[in-house]
Amino acid sequence: MSATMTALRMTAGTGISAIGRGVGQTLAALRNRRTGLEPCDFAGITHGYAGPVAGVQAHAVPPALAAYDCRNNRLIDMALRTDGVAEAIMAARAHYGAGRIGVVMGTSTSGVLASEDAFCAMDAQGRLPANFDYEHTQDLFSLARYVRAALELGGPALCVSMACASSSRAFMDAAYLIRAGICDAVVVGGADSLCRMTLRGFAALELVSARRCRPCDALRDGISIGEAAGIVLLERPDGRAISGPSAGFRATLLGYGASSDGHHMSTPHPQGAGAALAMQRALDSARLPVDAIDYINLHGTGTRANDAMEDRAVSTRFGTHVPCSSTKGWTGHTLGACGVLEAMICALAIEHGFMPGCLGVDEVDPTFRANVLTTNMARPVRHVMSNAFGFGGANCSLIFGKAA
């Protein structure tokens, strides 16, 4: 799935993860090669490493939105209050009108931790706590409803749940709303928070590493799970110009591509057929040749199968020369939020002319053909591709470029 598109402006944005809150802290951690992964100690689970966000437990949502209070919505609220994002969106609302700004969020688990806690507190008669509010917490639409309510927007709102491709696909759906003339701007992003289901579920699949994840390493043995949230204001190309705290995040969405290979519920197609197709469709959408891509932000989870598949797909489409790396050694795999978080990292790479090499790699897998970076590289960056691949064969590739 792809379509030739006109570049859309990313005029404000932020991300929060285990390596910091906002553009400045994230950039510093990437430059200093400082990981946010620490031994897991969440809800009684102590296996492997995890990437929690500092301060989320103590963060409070506004009293008027107390019904939405859960870890996932606290994360997105923290993002809204970082790097001047909410102020930039308020300026856009004043310019376009509340009804012309949409909301598209991506998440894989939403506020499932609230349901887990409720079931842990169930009484002897099997009754859940009276204050448990499924609709405003775990329900998949909760995230989009929260953002729309917090920003007082009136445009269309939806949540995308396509496992680890969720917030990458959210960019595509946001672009459709603008290209169709339904919206002048869209608040696009996502959040996924730590919970028992993902920590225990991935461990049950034997996909969690006992040490910090090391994507592309010859001895990689699994993922580290993180949490994150991110927000980007996507505007039509002839939209207003902004200035202020978020102006440093500016970039453009040049193209996108998606595919669904349906190879297996939890295992990628071994030859990367669907992933390669998504990347080619993104190039077609952006009207760019292969050699225009300066850097590829890999999905790169650290599992044997995922990284090998992605190497085959990347080397099939791009050969062996385009620098590529995964940033999950910093943040962990943030599941449905990785697309928007890594969009911010791509924007930083373009703005500051650097490519973050994989963390924790002693030796790149000798079977790999792609040009995997293991140290940071300083070089002008014009165009970046970012990949996200989800369970069930959901593949999504985005291409970002420098703002004019």
Image (cartoon, rainbow, N blue to C red):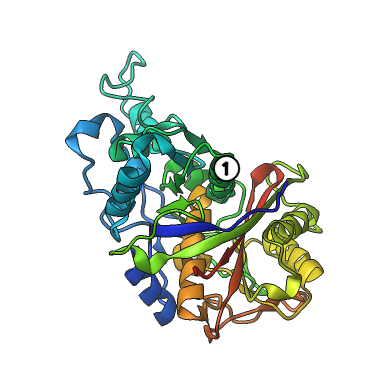
Q: Quadrant of residue 170?
A: top right
Residue 274: give x, y in percent of width and height: 77, 52
In this view, the residue in front, 135 or 215, is: 135
Q: Is residue 212 visible?
A: no
Q: Is residue 181 left or right of residue 18?
A: right
Question: In percent of the image, x 63 and y 74: which residue is there?
Answer: 324
Residue 184 visible to the viewer: yes
For image coordinates 49% across by 36% down, the residue present is 159
Residue of label 1 = 173
User: Where's residue 164, x and y in %?
Assistant: 57, 49
Image point (35%, 28%), residue name: 136
Position above or below: 62 against 220: above
Please, which residue is most extreme toward the front here? 238
The structure residue drawn at horizontal position 68% and vertical position 59%, both measured from the top left corner, is 306
Residue 1 drawn at (x, y percent): 73, 46
Query: Residue 90: percent from the left, percent from the top?
Result: 29, 47
Hey, what amino acid is under mark 1?
Answer: Asp
Seen in the picture, residue 118 relative to 196 is either above or below; the reply is above
Q: Nearer the viewer, residue 47 or 255?
A: 255
**Residue positioned most to the bottom:** 378
Label 1 crowd bin: few (<14), some (14–19), many (20+), radius 10 Å = many
Which structural element holds mark 1? Answer: helix
Using residue 44 as the reference point, say whether residue 175 is left or right of it: right
Left or right of residue 104, residue 29 in this image = left
